[in-house]
Image: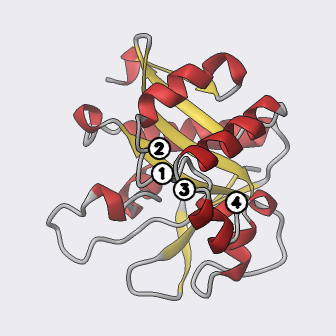
Amino acid sequence: MSTELSFQPLTIDQWNDFVSLFGERGACGGCWCMLWRLTRKQFESQKGEGNKLAMNAIVDSGEVPGILAYHNTEAIGWCAIAPRSSYPALLRSRILQPIDDRTCWSVARLFIEKSFRKKGISTELLRTASEYAKSQGAELVEGYPVEPKSEKDIPPAFAWTGIPKAFIRAGFKEVVRRSPTRPIMRLELS
């Protein structure tokens, strides 16, 4: 599968591909990858079209909020990655708050189109997103996957930050766990 994949940072040129991948619901409940970028009140008040417009404004500004994965010419995956400071809601999280003062980039979302799941695309996307972060000066990438409670599949709506297996395969290591199901994992880029 990896030989058929390509990756692109999300810029205005790829906006329509991003919209097509996320569909009418913005991937999940009108999020459009804005949950960690806003206060809960802001997020809820602009769920759906408002969040889509907010993400579009980020892309229009020239900021790259993540990486798209393509199979041939179809966008099939997404990894939201940016400096942790881009996600102020992480600072308010009891479980995901910073563990130290190191500057890092954060993987805030992984989304794979349904028919392409369980093919290793998340791992490839994490590797590519981490390389992109490194090219932008990052020395450390942090992720917040969800640990399934059993070997049974975790519903995609609950695994929107990825699962530990994909992070481990991409070279990340668990550094702290403040919840039984939410490790904080890191990849040193130096």
Q: CA distance from mark 4 to mark 3?
A: 13 Å
**In terms of secondary structure, where does tag 2 sit?**
loop
> Callout 2: few (<14), some (14-19), or many (20+) C-alpha neighbours within 10 Å?
many
Query: Which amino acid is tagged 1?
Result: Gly
Q: Which residue is mark 3?
A: 47
Label 3 near label 4: C-beta < 8 Å?
Answer: no
Which color scheme did the rendering employ for the protein? secondary structure
User: How packed is label 1: few (under 14 Cα within 10 Å), some, or many (20 or more)?
Assistant: many
Q: Secondary structure at mark 4?
A: helix
User: Where is residue 116 drawn, in percent x and y?
Assistant: 28, 33
Q: Are marks 3 and 1 in contact (CB under 8 Å)?
A: yes
Which residue in the protein does label 2 denote?
A: 26
Query: Residue 157 falls in which quadrant of the image?
Result: bottom left
Which residue is tagged 4? 37
**Which-is-in-front pick, marks 2 and 3?**
3
Quadrant showing the N terminus: top left
Label whose residue precedes the other's in the sequence (3 or 1)? 1
Tell me the residue at 26%/38% (across/down).
Answer: 114
In this picture, residue 160 sits left or right of residue 33? left
Q: Which residue is mark 1?
A: 30
What amino acid is found at the position of numbered circle 3 in the picture? Lys
- Label 4 sits on what residue type? Arg
* Quadrant of the image occupied by residue 106: bottom right
Label 3 residue SS: loop
Quick one: label 2 or label 4, which is nearer the N terminus?
2
The amino acid sitting under disc 2 is Gly
Give me the residue at 44% from left, 37% from top: 22
Residue 13, placed above or below residue 29 = above
Q: Position of residue 12 (x, y in %)?
A: 71, 22
Tell which circle, 4 or 1, labels the residue nearer the N-terminal end: 1
Mark nearest the camera among 4 and 1 is 1
